[in-house]
Amino acid sequence: MTLLPLFLIYLALWTAYSAPPFRLKAVPILDFIVSGVGAGLLPFVIGMGTSRTLNISISVVLSGVLPFMLVHSGGHILQTLADYEADSKTGVQTFVVKYGREKGIFVVGLLSLITGLLPLLYISFGILPLGYVLLVFIPLPFCIPIAKRYVELLGDPSAKNVVNLQKTVIKYGIIIMFEVAAYILMLKTFGF
């Protein structure tokens, strides 16, 4: 019963995201913010609700899931970059349609940069122990091909370059996620 309100909020958010009268996916800026909150925050809050032993404040959860929210928001914008022509023709007013591809590309890069720098920020404020500093550097070799595709997209915001970036992000993003998960598991297991 304690999870019912969270599930209802989750269902209401995604319904309002897709269905009239709200159709939040067609409201610029709100489209990627709602996507980030719905996929990056709410599942973790619901997960917290399943444990009676956890006594964690929402601010700790928010700081922990902020990278997921930013990545998901950036991924949402990247997807709308690929859907630009279709959304324009059908009148779906996404962030990218309203403000243009170039601004969408810039925001994807900005959200990605912030996500990459968050571990350093968390370490500097004592939210993460110093052992987690490698979280910033371990994925760097796999970020190079993604950055190259991003620079290509900045130079030529064509649909082809958007698709190339999407494919590269999927390919190397999976490797990065496994790498980060393995490193965190090692830190937790061996107590480094």
Image (cartoon, rainbow, N blue to C red):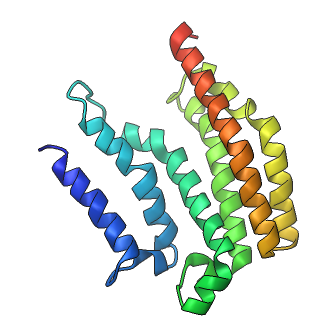
| Residue that sits furthest to the top in the current view | 190
In this view, 102 is above or below 171: below
Q: Quadrant of the C terminus?
A: top right
Q: Is residue 121 left or right of residue 169?
A: left
Q: Residue at x 60, y 41 (%)?
A: 118
Image coordinates for residue 111, horizontal then vertical, percent: 63, 56
Q: Nearer the viewer, residue 57 or 34?
A: 34
| Residue under the point 67% across and 72% down | 81
- Against 105, residue 115 (above or below) is above
Left-right relation of 23 to 32? left
Q: Position of residue 112 (x, y in %)?
A: 66, 52
- Asked which quadrant contains residue 3, the reply is top left
Residue farthest left in this picture: 1
Question: Image point 37% across, 42% down: which residue?
Answer: 44
Q: Residue at x 66, y 80 (%)?
A: 84
Residue 61: give x, y in percent of width and height.
Answer: 39, 39
Q: How many marks?
A: 0
Above or below for 134 versus 15 = above
Left or right? Give the position of 156 relative to 96: right
Which of the image's four quarters has the N terminus? top left
In-front residue for pair 168/120: 168
Residue 133, horizontal then vertical, whole percent: 66, 26
